[in-house]
Amino acid sequence: MMRYVLVYGGLAGAIVISVLCASFALELPNHTSSLWFGYLVMLVALSLIFVGVKRYRDVECGGVIRFGRALGLGLGIAALAGVVYVIGWELYLAMTGWDFMAEYGASIVQGMRAKGASAAAIAAKTEELRGYAEMYRNPVYRTAMTFAEIFPVGLVVAFVSAAVLRNPRMLPARA
């Protein structure tokens, strides 16, 4: 089972971090569109959980897998994908020297100004974002937040995959 976790989890994490770093390097128009794009990339890459669980069910288990075992494999793949994503993000930040939170905060404030927010609301949001930026400088907080971005998506995909693939009639193994 560990081989499936390593292959599919490593591949999913590498796909997510590669595509997201490339999108940041190419400077997507704003952080709102990159947020949606990022979660879409995560969902597509983490569909490898389904592929990995199905392959394990078909090759190693003779076409039958219990929900718990399928969920465990899916969570393992999701966890490794999250670890690869965190490591990739930390390397990207270290190599580029990019102050992500400063740019993100500036984008939020700029959006508020464009929508005609009051000076008091902008000042309050700026102070709030300053606090987040300070917390983000802490590597423990930053890695936990980065992992928390991707793992819930993997959790959902793992549950759906386990629920669907526990039925041996669903996408049966080919003879």
Image (cartoon, rainbow, N blue to C red):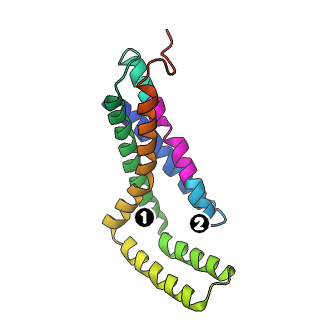
Which amino acid is tagged 2? His
- Classify residue 27 by image quadrant: bottom right
Position of 6 compared to 41: left or right?
left
Residue designated by label 1: 94
Answer with mark 1 or mark 2, whichever residue precedes in sequence: 2
- Classify residue 7 by image quadrant: top left
Q: Secondary structure at mark 1?
A: helix
Q: Which residue lies at the image location 67% right of the left edge and 84% below the top edge?
A: 116
Residue designated by label 2: 31
Decide whether residue 103 is among the magenta residues: no
Q: Residues within 10 Å of mark 2 (few under 14, many from 20)?
A: some
Please identify, in this view, whether the residue under mark 1 or under mark 2 is nearer the observer: 2
Query: Which percent across, then down, holds residue 162?
Result: 41, 32
Which amino acid is tagged 1? Ala
Which stretch is magenta? 39-52
Magenta: main secondary structure: helix
